[in-house]
Amino acid sequence: MTEAEQRAVAERQRIEEELMAVVAPLVRRFAVQMRREGVQASKGEVMVAVGFPRIPKPSNPFTLGKVNAGWKAAVDAAVGAVEVVIAPVTGSAAATAAYLEGVRTRMMLAGYPVNVHEAITNVLANAQAGGWSAAGVEKALSEALGLAKVAPEATAQASATAWETAARDLSRTEATRAFNYAEQGAMAQRGFPRKQWVAVMDARTRPTHATAHGQEVAVNEPFIVGGWAMMYPGDDAAPPEETANCRCVLVESGEPEDMNAILGEDDGGAGEE
């Protein structure tokens, strides 16, 4: 990697770690809340299973709506925390506001709450069938949500419902998007005519991003990555298959030129007075 590429990769990683520091506690708090509500929901069902077979089976009180409401509260808190990290990157109040609205939308569409709901309802079904105690339910929920103490190798293979995995996914994806979103605007303002896609070339790199590594286009033109037009790595014009957990960065290329010429703008030929 060139020195400029190394700086860009390091800066993107710095933003990821700052985001992780503020997002992780909020995602964990959500997981703890869902575990608590899952245990509460299990109590009536377990009672029916083990001691009162003549009482009609209650409906499952742990609904997706309950999970979504808890996730919305987590998202609201996360957006406020993310703003502190993102504002210096995006550079202006308007850009920050627009970016944060996108963060809110993307987090609300994330698959994590659905995964959490499915995991908890599966535990509740097993608890009802097996007549588990509340302690047994809590232990199973802790394991399902990644809240239990596990060996390092187990953590590395964390499931889609593990809170730490979800926090890292969100932080990495948004760090990449924020850094490159800001760079896209900044390099045009600095007068660079071209930009280059730089991938972190290791075993985790997507094949489409490894192929895109080194692709160079005009600063106001999109890259074509995996068949999608993307102005920068993390651009949500592409689907999550091309953006989630991406670590790629944007770097400028060529020598600075007149900004208006690069952006295709014309002042109408007006000269100095």
Image: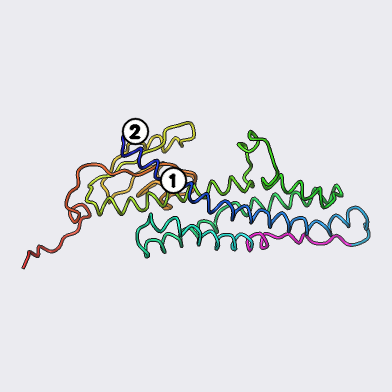
Residue that badge 1 annotates: 14
In the shown orientation, is residue 185 left or right of residue 17? left
Report the number of numbered marks.
2
Q: Residue at x 58, y 48 (%)?
A: 166
Residue 156 lies in magenta, yes or no?
Answer: no
Q: Dot 2: few (<14), some (14–19), or many (≥20) neighbours within 10 Å?
A: few
Point out the residue furthest to the left here. Answer: 273
Kindly identify the amino acid type of the residue bearing the numbered disc 1: Arg
Residue that badge 2 annotates: 1
Horizontal and vertical percent position of residue 93? 37, 64
Horizontal and vertical percent position of residue 228? 40, 46
Q: Dot 1: few (<14), some (14–19), or many (≥20) neighbours within 10 Å?
A: few
Question: Relative to 252, does residue 62 appear above or below in the rendering?
Answer: below
Q: Residue at x 65, y 36 (%)?
A: 154
Q: CA distance from mark 1 to mark 2?
A: 18 Å
Displayed quadrant of residue 100: bottom left
Q: Residue at x 59, y 53 (%)?
A: 25
Question: Relative to 240, does residue 107 appear above or below in the rendering?
Answer: below
Name the secondary structure under disc 1: helix
| Range covered by the magenta-colored residues | 56-69
Quarter holding the C terminus?
A: bottom left
Query: Mark 1 or mark 2, which has the lower sequence index?
Result: 2
Quarter holding the N terminus?
A: top left
Q: Nearer the viewer, residue 252 or 7?
A: 7
Horizontal and vertical percent position of residue 163? 62, 48
The reply to whether the C-beta atoms of the residues labelled 1 and 2 are less than 8 Å apart is no
Name the secondary structure under disc 2: loop
